[in-house]
Image (cartoon, helix red, strand yellow):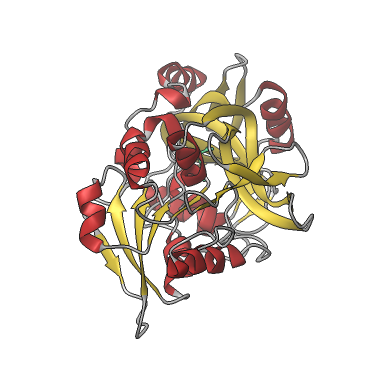
């Protein structure tokens, strides 16, 4: 049944089946995992994006809140080959338009050939191609979504105790964090103060952290100037760690540069090599920008497929960051030791390579 349409920047309007009604626009991206749809759909990194699942059946093991990475669905719309009723009903309850019975192989090839592009979606009994085109016309370039940090950050600071007798303290700057990053720190006896992305140095000093941790998040790292400024002011005062958007913001803070990729890396099978040990790990990734110039930091890990920077470190300034998602959720557990490494740095007060 055709009661949904997706309008692409190519001028094409593709017909589909509505699984959750509504109209929306966003940057059209795809992710390839065959599991982890609850984690992806609640990952704040997908804010302002339309998420296409390359795997053909989404929802075959239901929907469980304990797998959520935040308190809501973040993509502005969802595209699949087939969505189960569990997922379709969940998205409808969340007010997120969803369409399926579309050739997602073809759509993914379009995105790979043209790069992540704008799109507009209209789904439901009143949907028309014109309404989908009207949504497309409203869609901004991702770098022009300048309020994206405000859409995903905490309203007020949150405290997540680890329950340990002698905990370390992490100040996590919430640029759209996944819950499993907080959990990964708590599980290693670190109390976590989650602060808004525009927290000040006074806000950080008030919690007296052993580690400043910059989270993952959506959009262009250039639109997180308050966080970048906080990192600039915090360097050499406290060890610093970051994941994904966090790596990008920290790189910019130490004089580096970031750039938009054609269609990014989104999946659970991205191989990464450590240039020091030459060990290769499989990683979970979800990003559309990358670090083009690491500034004052050393590139310690590279993507095996395209040599993009996956790990940056500074012994001088006590910094360790990763472009991929070490917490996985979903994905392989090859990289969980990142959290052990950054908490060891926090406990010692310096990067392991920096002599006392
Ligand atoms: N998961 C993330 O933190 C994504 C980082 C950034 N928004 C990008 O797309 O590259």
Q: Is residue 354 visible?
A: yes
Q: Residue 313 appears at what percent x and percent y?
A: 57, 49
| Image quadrant where one finds the N terminus | top right
Q: Is residue 20 visible?
A: no
Residue lying at the far top in this picture: please name it.
11
Closer to the camera, 354 or 38? 354
Q: Residue 93 appears at what percent x and percent y?
A: 38, 52
Q: Residue 304 appears at what percent x and percent y?
A: 77, 44
Circle count = 0
Q: Residue at x 67, y 52 (%)?
A: 33
Report the side of 89 relative to 95 (left or right).
right
Q: Residue at x 73, y 58 (%)?
A: 281
Q: Residue 112 appears at what percent x and percent y?
A: 71, 29
Report the side of 343 relative to 275 (left or right).
left
Residue 56 higher or lower than 10, as above or below: below
Residue 115 falls in image quadrant? top right
Residue lying at the far front in this picture: please name it.
356
Q: Residue at x 29, y 39 (%)?
A: 150
Report the side of 77 relative to 103 (left or right).
left
Report the side of 338 relative to 270 (left or right).
left
Closer to the camera, 59 or 147? 147
Q: Residue at x 27, y 42 (%)?
A: 198
Residue 68 higher or lower than 95, as above or below: below
Closer to the camera, 102 or 169? 169
Residue 310 higher or lower than 355, as above or below: above
């Amino acid at each position: 049944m055709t009661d949904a349409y997706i309008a692409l920047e190519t001028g094409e309007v593709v017909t589909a089946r509505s699984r959750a009604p509504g109209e929306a626009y966003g940057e059209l991206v795809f992710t390839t995992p065959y599991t982890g749809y609850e984690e992806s759909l609640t990952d704040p990194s997908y804010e302002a994006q339309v998420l296409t699942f390359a795997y053909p059946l989404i929802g075959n093991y239901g929907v469980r809140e304990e797998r959520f990475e935040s308190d809501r669905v973040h993509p502005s719309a969802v595209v699949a080959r087939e969505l189960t009723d569990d997922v379709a009903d969940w998205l409808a309850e969340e007010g997120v338009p969803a369409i399926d019975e579309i050739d997602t192989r073809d759509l993914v090839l379009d995105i790979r050939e043209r790069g992540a592009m704008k799109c507009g979606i209209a789904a439901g009994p009143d949907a028309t191609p014109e309404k989908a085109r009207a949504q497309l016309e409203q869609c901004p370039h991702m770098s022009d979504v300048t309020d994206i940090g405000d859409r995903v950050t905490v309203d007020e600071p949150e405290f997540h105790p680890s329950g340990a007798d002698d905990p370390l303290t992490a100040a996590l700057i919430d640029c759209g964090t996944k819950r499993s990053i907080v959990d990964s720190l708590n599980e290693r006896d670190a109390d976590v103060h989650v602060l808004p992305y525009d927290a000040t140095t006074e806000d950080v000093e008030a919690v007296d952290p052993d580690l400043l941790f910059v989270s993952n998040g959506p959009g262009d790292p250039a639109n997180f100037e308050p966080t970048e400024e906080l990192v600039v002011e915090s360097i050499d005062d406290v060890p610093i760690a970051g994941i994904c958007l966090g790596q990008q913001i920290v790189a910019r803070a130490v004089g580096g540069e970031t750039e938009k990729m054609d269609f990014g890396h989104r999946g659970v099978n991205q191989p990464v090599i450590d240039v020091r040990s030459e060990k290769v790990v499989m990683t979970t990734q979800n990003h559309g920008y990358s670090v083009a110039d690491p500034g004052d930091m050393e590139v310690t890990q590279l993507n095996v497929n395209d040599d993009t920077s996956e790990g940056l470190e500074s012994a001088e300034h006590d910094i360790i960051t990763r472009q991929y998602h070490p917490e996985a959720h979903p994905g392989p557990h090859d990289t969980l030791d990142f959290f052990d490494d950054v908490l060891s740095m926090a406990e010692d007060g310096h990067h392991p390579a920096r002599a006392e």
